[in-house]
Image (cartoon, rainbow, N blue to C red):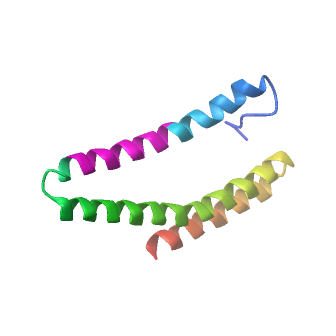
Amino acid sequence: MQGIRNLTEGPVMRQLFRLSMPIMATSFIQMAYSLTDMAWVGRIGSEALAAIGAMGILTWMSGSISLLNKVGSEVSVGQSVGARNEGDARQFASHNITLSLIISIA
């Protein structure tokens, strides 16, 4: 398997930092996007601002639903990779891609 990083080797703080930075950057970009929307639309009026707030909550909820499959995929594939069972890892990844497509269509 190519591109697999072993997070159990090396300094713990460095590994945690490398793992957490993309997650924090993504969260920051999503927050900045919502705040920018609110700043621009807030000039129109309070009703428009309330609509943006409601859409932000719906976006957050749909993202949370998609995380159900993502977390399950990470755990199942990660355990297979840790057990050095490439066949199971590929099978779990394939099943989770199918589930992601079904969830996104629904």
Point 15% across, 58% down: residue: 45
51, 106: nearer the viewer = 51
Q: Name the image quarter holding the N terminus.
A: top right
Q: Is residue 31 magenta?
A: yes
Give left or right: position of 17 versus 78: left
Q: Is residue 4 above or below residue 70?
A: above
Residue closest to the far left: 44
**What count of labels does the image hold?**
0
Q: Position of residue 95 (x, y in %)?
A: 66, 66
Q: Residue furthest right?
A: 83
Residue 59's spot in the image, x, y percent?
40, 62
Using the image as rendered, state which of residue 76 and residue 40 is in the foreground: 40
Majority SS type along the magenta span = helix
**Residue 40, image x, y percentages:** 19, 47
Residue at the (52%, 73%) spot, across then down: 102
Q: Residue 99 lies in what quarter of the image? A: bottom right
Magenta includes 61? no
Write the residue at 14% across / 50% down: 43
Range of residues picked out in magenta: 25-39
| Image quadrant where residue 29 sits | top left
Q: In the rendered view, does 89 fall on the left or right side of 25?
A: right
56 horizontally vs 18: left or right: left
Left/right of residue 57 with respect to residue 46 in the rendered view: right
Direction bottom: furthest residue:
106
Q: Nearer the viewer, residue 86 or 19?
A: 19
| Spot occupied by residue 35 in the image (x, y as percentages of width and height) | 32, 46
